[in-house]
Image (cartoon, rainbow, N blue to C red):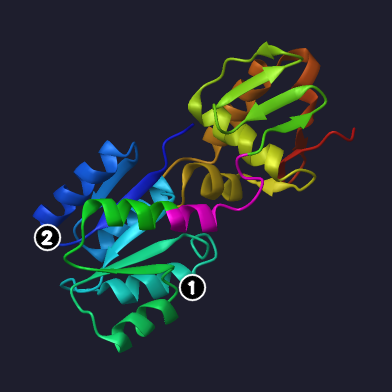
Amino acid sequence: MTAKTVLIVDDEAPIREMIAVALEMADYHVLEADNAQTAHAMVVDHQPDLVLLDWMMPGTSGIELARRLKREETTAELPIIMLTAKGEEDNKIQGLEAGADDYITKPFSPRELVARLKAVLRRTTPRGVEDPVEVEGLLLDPVSHRVSADGRAVEMGPTEYRLLQFFMTHQERAYTRSQLLDQVWGGNVYVEERTVDVHIRRLRKALGDRHQHLVQTVRGTGYRFSAKG
């Protein structure tokens, strides 16, 4: 199964390090940020599966970042666990009202943190996200990150894979190049729109004669994935 990515946001390096070690031992992929601005950019670029967010940080507080992430459409569904040294009830309520999915008070044991994290990820992983998708014999398995066509493995690069996964889970809708850049590359990555065309060409080549027609050019707009002619 593909490792889930967790972003740890805390201005104290020893705490980040302690959490990172515990999560890596539990087979999570870890990203770290020491302030809200860096954290927001990393969320946009790396699209983590969950954010562990410290309440008290210099500059923008964790609660402000949580509100911002929940306000923005692309990150509204991102699970957040607040980390705080405050045990008071009103802070807990404030954190949950800002959109946090859970709350853990320092000091905590790494085992408790991992257990809480697993529970939140189980609750928030939408049904079907890890289910294989199949169209006309083309099968994409998001758990093993493999693509096959009529039972034969299809080799492609990571960007082509992400493009195909986005298309197969958003069929029959036309997307502009800039929408595809936002969804597949992440909004903070500065790539020319022509780059999309290059990867579409590579994706079609990887799919071969039997399936390349599924990735359709929509004149004046961009691209769509469709099993209809």
Residue tagged 2: 12
Q: Secondary structure at mark 1?
A: helix
Residue 189 seen in this snapshot: no
State the extent of the magenta-drawn residues as a range. Answer: 119-130
Residue 18 seen in this snapshot: yes
> Which residue reaches farthest top?
152
Question: Which residue is painted at 32% across and 76% down in the image?
Answer: 63
Q: Amino acid at mark 2?
A: Glu
- Contact between marks 1 and 2 (CB within 8 A): the answer is no
Tell me the quarter of the picture where residue 94 sits: bottom left
Badge 1 or badge 2: first in the primary sequence? 2
Q: Is residue 146 above or below residue 74?
A: above
Categorize mark 1 by other alpha carbons within 10 Å: few (<14), some (14-19), many (20+).
some
What label sits on residue 201 in the rendered view? none
Q: Nearer the viewer, residue 66 or 88?
A: 88
Residue tagged 1: 71
Tell me the quarter of the picture where residue 166 sits: top right
Q: Secondary structure at mark 2?
A: loop
Q: Is residue 25 above or below residue 212?
A: below
Residue 185 location, x and y as percent?
48, 42
Which quadrant is home to the C terminus?
top right
Can residue 61 be found in the magenta stretch? Answer: no
